[in-house]
Image: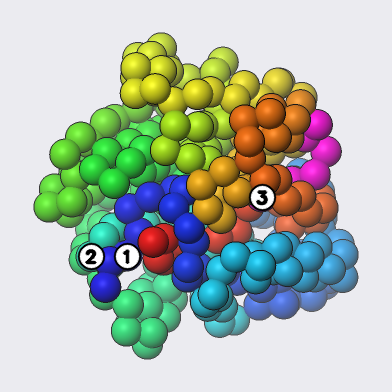
């Protein structure tokens, strides 16, 4: 079986975590939201409603959805199932988050994958830290890794070694300081692949060489305006080529996607996405895209 080395091929199997298991209840959120650096305290009941709508969109296209279990070892950020692992054609790489509060998620995820008989091809060790949000497959043979506060040089060295059998071009992108160490800026904060030749980007945060590389590869860039960038407009999940999911309220980004021939689903993501700065790509860990 071939696992995932794409951000846009038709999504067949995905791992997510329900707010029932990640947020637990309102009392838990009240106690934890500041520690996990959310913008505001999420409303638990509304989060569950939003997630139900999000799942309904996924179910239209994805034949297998796996749910991570509740665990006392992890916190509310475990809702963002994308970050503790990254898939390659041969299976998963277990990462170790650059956000210390999230580091216990790796062991829980590893146990889950083992129980599901999903192969693990590597695991970060020692001082290496990396989040899944910093690792992007541009195409089946091109892997881009963001070097920032969540992914360090040692992780990049190990990732290059682990992915060598599957990758022809391994590209490192230096990430800007932007809003600082406490805020979460991932590589995927400013690029989402929606098709082989279509990407949603926020160019202001992109290194020139990387932006030029995308254009040289013939990738059309959909430019997310500043206000929509802060509403997670750059965080777009492809369910299939040019079929994608977006947090609602991103009018310009949505229109540009429609003009590029894309089908766009929207969900209200105030509680599950905006308050924790984790859009639809963060909420999902694609296992198989075929």
Q: Residues within 10 Å of mark 3 (few under 14, many from 20)?
A: many
Q: Residue at x 47, y 20 (%)?
A: 206
Earlier in the chain: of badge 1 and badge 2, it is: 1
In this view, the residue farthest toward the front is 261
Residue 137, percent from left and from top: 36, 43
**Residue 230 to residue 203: above or below:** below
**Residue hosting label 1:** 3
Mark count: 3
Residue shown at 77% from the left, 70% from the top: 52
Which residue: 56% across, 15% down?
204
Task: Using residue 81 as the reference point, say whether residue 233 is left or right of it.
Answer: right
Q: Which residue is mark 2?
A: 90
Q: Residue furthest bottom?
A: 115
| Quadrant containing the N terminus in the rendered view | bottom left
Q: Is residue 155 above or below residue 122?
A: above
Residue located beneath label 3 in the image? 245
Between disc 1 and disc 3, whose residue precedes?
1
Q: Residues within 10 Å of mark 1 (few under 14, many from 20)?
A: some
Q: Mark 1 and 2 residues: CB-CB less than 8 Å, in contact?
A: yes
> What stretch of residues is rendered in magenta?
245-251
Mark 2 vs mark 3: which is more N-terminal? 2
| Label 2 neighbour load within 10 Å: few <14, some 14-19, many 20+ | some
State the image coordinates of residue 229 (x, y, percent, origin top left).
68, 29
């Amino acid at each position: 079986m071939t696992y995932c080395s794409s951000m846009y091929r038709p999504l067949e199997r995905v791992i997510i975590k329900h707010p029932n298991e990640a947020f637990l209840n309102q009392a838990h959120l009240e106690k934890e939201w500041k520690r996990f650096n959310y913008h505001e305290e999420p409303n638990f009941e509304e989060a569950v409603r939003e997630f139900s709508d999000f799942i309904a969109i996924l179910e239209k296209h994805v034949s297998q959805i796996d749910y991570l279990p509740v665990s006392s070892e992890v916190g509310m950020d475990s809702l963002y199932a994308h970050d503790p692992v990254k898939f390659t054609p041969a299976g998963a790489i277990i990462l170790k988050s650059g956000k210390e509060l999230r580091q216990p998620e790796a062991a829980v995820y590893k146990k889950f994958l083992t129980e599901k008989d999903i192969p693990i091809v590597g695991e970060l060790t020692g001082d290496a830290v990396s989040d899944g949000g910093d690792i992007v497959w541009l195409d089946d043979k091109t892997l881009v890794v963001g070097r920032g506060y969540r992914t360090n040089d040692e992780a990049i060295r190990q990732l290059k070694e682990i992915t060598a059998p599957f990758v022809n071009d391994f590209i490192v992108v230096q990430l800007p300081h932007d809003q600082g160490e406490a805020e979460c800026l991932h590589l995927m904060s400013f690029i989402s692949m929606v098709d082989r030749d279509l990407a949603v980007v926020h160019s202001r945060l992109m290194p020139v060489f990387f932006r030029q590389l995308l254009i040289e590869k013939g990738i059309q860039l959909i430019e997310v305006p500043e206000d929509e960038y802060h509403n997670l407009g750059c965080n777009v999940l492809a369910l299939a080529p040019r079929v994608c999911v977006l947090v609602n309220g991103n009018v310009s980004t949505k229109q540009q996607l429609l003009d590029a021939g894309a089908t766009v689903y929207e969900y209200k993501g105030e509680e599950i996405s905006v308050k924790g700065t984790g859009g639809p790509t963060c909420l999902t860990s694609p296992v198989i895209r075929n």
